[in-house]
Image (cartoon, helix red, strand yellow):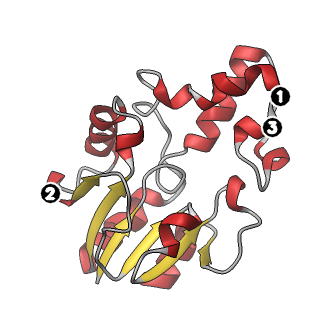
Amino acid sequence: MVVFIDMDEVIADTYGAHIEIYNREHRASLDPVQCLGKEVWHMVPEAHRDTVRNHARRRGFFKDLNPLPHSQEVIKELAGVHEVYIASAAMQFPNSLEEKSEWLDRHLPFIPWQNRILCGHKHILKGDVLIDDRSYNLKHFNGRGILFSSPHNAHTNGFERARDWLEVRQLLL
């Protein structure tokens, strides 16, 4: 099978990074559980919303993200039996191209550069499976779409869902 895997909020913990930066910079105690069904910027005072929305435009934001639990080991297993591509909508944040490439070199060195797609719209992808946290990417994918759970999509329905990487393993291996 050809399997496409999104990066942000699927492999790399951008949601957690937004909360961590916000809490540090504003001496707040926002918790992901408080944010279920919402974007982080929806959950902060109006005066801080643009700041949170612009975290991803900062140099270094994507470089130091934490990998989500079990993502590295399961993706390595998937790559052993399937043709795996990392597909990330990196064009939205141009500085992310280099940082995401470096992140992949560090955390998923077994995925060669030829299997990394840093793109805009994902509806152009042609394959068997797309694992993504955004339903709009899955809606127009012609294969099997798996919605990867993230606090922001807690109330999204209508898609096959994987709550974590251990569930991805069960679904695809």
Q: Residues within 10 Å of mark 1 (few under 14, many from 20)?
A: few
Q: Looking at the picture, how far across and down is residue 151, in whole percent?
A: 71, 54
Q: Looking at the picture, how far across and down is residue 34, in whole percent?
A: 85, 45
In space, the residues marked 1 and 3 are separated at their CA atoms by 11 Å
- At 56% across and 61% down in the image, what residue appears? 134
Left or right relative to 146: residue 121: left
Q: Residues within 10 Å of mark 2 (few under 14, many from 20)?
A: few
The residue closer to the viewer here, 94 or 64, is 94
The circle on residue 114 is 2
Sequence order check, earlier mark of 1 and 3: 1
Locate the N terminus and report the quarter of the image it occupies: bottom left
The circle on residue 29 is 1
Q: Which one is closest to the eye, mark 2 or mark 1?
A: 2
In space, the residues marked 2 and 1 are separated at their CA atoms by 41 Å
Give the residue type at disc 1: Ser
Give the residue type at disc 2: Gln
Left or right relative to 16: residue 48: right
Q: Looking at the picture, how far across and down is residue 121, in whole percent?
A: 38, 58
Q: Secondary structure at mark 2?
A: helix
- At 67% across and 80% down in the image, what residue appears? 158
Q: Looking at the picture, how far across and down is residue 18, in whole percent?
A: 63, 33
Sequence order check, earlier mark of 2 and 1: 1
